[in-house]
Image (cartoon, rainbow, N blue to C red):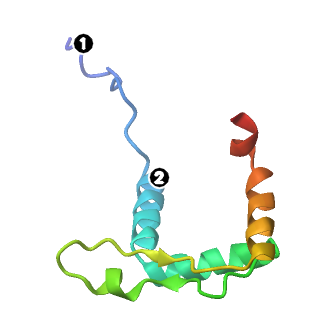
C-alpha cells in the first residue's frame, strides 16, 4: 500500500475564508479613498479630526509607480498632542 496517500502536508494550506479575507484586505489597502474614509472614522471615534485627511491626488494618478499615498495633512498642536496620547496608549507603545 502507498504510504504517501494519507500523509498530511508539512505546511497547512490557507482556508478559503483566509484567502478571501487576505484578498479583501489587499483590495481595500489598494483603494486610497476607502482607507481614508475608514481612517477618518476611526480617528473620529478617538476624538481626533485631521482636516486635511484624504488621498494624495498626485500619487494616485501616476502611472510610473502606482503607490497611492494618504495625505495626513498639517494639524494644530492640540490635535498633535491628542494623536500622540492615543498612540502612546496602544499595546505596541507599551512593548517598547
Please say if 88 is above or below 40. above
- Of the two numbered discs 1 and 2 on the same chain, state the one appearing first in sequence: 1
Extreme front residue here?
Answer: 77
Q: Residue at x 46, y 84 (%)?
A: 55
Left or right, residue 14 beside residue 79 = left
Q: Nearer the viewer, mark 1 or mark 2?
A: 2
Rounded to the nearest angstrom, the CA distance separating label 1 from label 2 is 30 Å
Would residue 75 be found to the left or right of residue 30 on screen? right
Q: Which residue is mark 1?
A: 3
Q: Quadrant of the C terminus?
A: top right
**In screen coordinates, is 5 left or right of 31?**
left
What residue does disc 2 label? 18
In depth, the one of 85 and 43 nearer the eye is 85
Residue 93, relative to residue 35: is it above or below? above
Which quadrant does the N terminus fall into? top left
The image quadrant of residue 50 is: bottom right
Please report the residue visible at 42 percent of the width from the left and 74 percent of the height from the top.
69
Residue 13, position in %: x, y?
Answer: 37, 39
**Is disc 2 placed on a helix, strand or loop?**
helix
| Percent position of residue 5, x then y | 26, 22
Q: Is residue 25 above or below residue 9?
A: below
Q: Position of residue 90 (x, y in %)?
A: 75, 50
Amino acid at each position: 500500500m502507498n504510504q504517501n496517500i494519507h500523509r498530511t502536508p508539512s505546511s497547512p494550506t490557507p482556508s478559503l475564508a483566509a484567502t478571501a479575507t487576505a484578498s479583501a484586505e489587499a483590495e481595500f489597502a489598494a483603494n486610497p479613498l476607502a482607507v481614508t474614509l475608514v481612517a477618518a472614522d476611526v480617528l473620529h471615534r478617538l476624538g481626533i479630526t485631521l482636516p486635511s485627511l484624504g488621498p494624495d491626488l498626485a500619487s494616485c494618478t501616476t502611472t510610473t509607480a502606482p503607490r497611492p499615498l494618504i495625505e495626513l495633512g498639517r494639524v494644530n498642536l492640540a490635535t498633535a498632542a491628542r494623536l500622540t496620547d492615543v498612540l502612546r496608549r496602544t499595546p505596541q507603545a507599551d512593548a517598547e
